[in-house]
Amino acid sequence: MLVPSLQKLLAALRRLPGVGPKSAQRIGYHLLRATREEATELARAVVALKDRVGLCSVCGNVAERAEGVSDKTPLECPVCADPRRDSSRLLIVEEPYNVEAFQKTGVYDGLYHVLGGLFDPLAGVGAVELGLDALARRVSGGSFREVILATSPTTAGEATASYIHELLKPLGVTLTRIAVGLAPGADVDYADEISLRLALEGRREYGSIGR
Ligand SMILES: [Zn+2]
């Protein structure tokens, strides 16, 4: 029989993605043996994440509230806050960690738009849930010349890209799709930097011959 505090911790750990009962036990007992400083550092990092980190009000990327700034102030991510970014190009990705991956390629200096997922009819995720009307407003009100669709070449990724293409086509921007480097069905999430760079550099106009 576990003591209540340990039981509670293990239950919380088991709710984390990829953590089964065995891993929860390992982490729990590791924390039990850790110094108070180590454990406090982890606890503080989790609380700080929840208190200060949220999604950018412009692009949906991860953003952090500066010390002393009211929690009523809309968050702005480091990319949107950087005036040196090329505001004529917009790269559409699924998740905030995809922004990180494209940033690491070092070849893209435009802006991003994070969908926060892909079409998933079974889970009830569609245009409304992905905030695609906000995306259309952002593109029509911005100075973008090119919008790059960088969702994964999976069924859900292609369906989402196709919908966005139809949605943004009337706005007169050039719509491109990341291409080579990612095998069909491969996931943007797991692509390495070189594959992502090739996919980005090899992008073609959406729907062009050879896709
Ligand atoms: Zn942003």
Image: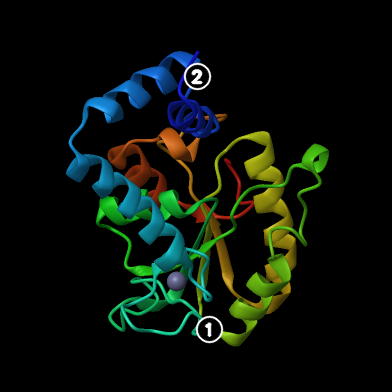
State the residue position of label 2. 20
Residue 161, label in figure: none
Q: Is residue 51 above or below residue 76?
A: above
Q: Is residue 157 above or below residue 62?
A: above
Residue at 42%, 33% in the rendered image: 190
In this view, the residue in front, 83 or 180, is 83
Q: Is residue 26 above or below residue 174?
A: above
Figure disc tally: 2
- Colour treatment of the image: rainbow
Amino acid under disc 1: Lys
Label 2 CB-ligand 1 distance < 8 A? no
124 with respect to 30 (left or right):
right
- Label 1 secondary element: loop
- Label 2 secondary element: loop
Place of residue 150 in the rendered image (x, y in percent of width and height, measured from the top left) = 51, 51
Label 1 CB-ligand 1 distance < 8 A? no
Kindly report the distance in space between the C-alpha atoms of the residues bearing marks 2 and 1: 37 Å
In this view, the residue in front, 191 or 34, is 34
Place of residue 189 in the rendered image (x, y in percent of width and height, measured from the top left) = 46, 39
State the residue position of label 1. 72
Q: Quadrant of residue 85?
A: bottom left
- The numbered mark, 2 or 1, whose residue comes first in the sequence reads 2
Q: Quadrant of residue 68?
A: bottom left
Q: Residues within 10 Å of mark 1 (few under 14, many from 20)?
A: few
Residue at 55%, 41% in the rendered image: 152
Residue at 28%, 39% in the rendered image: 194
* Quadrant assignment for ligand 1: bottom left
Amino acid under disc 2: Gly
Q: In what quadrant of the picture does the C terminus appear? A: top right
Residue at 42%, 49% in the rendered image: 97
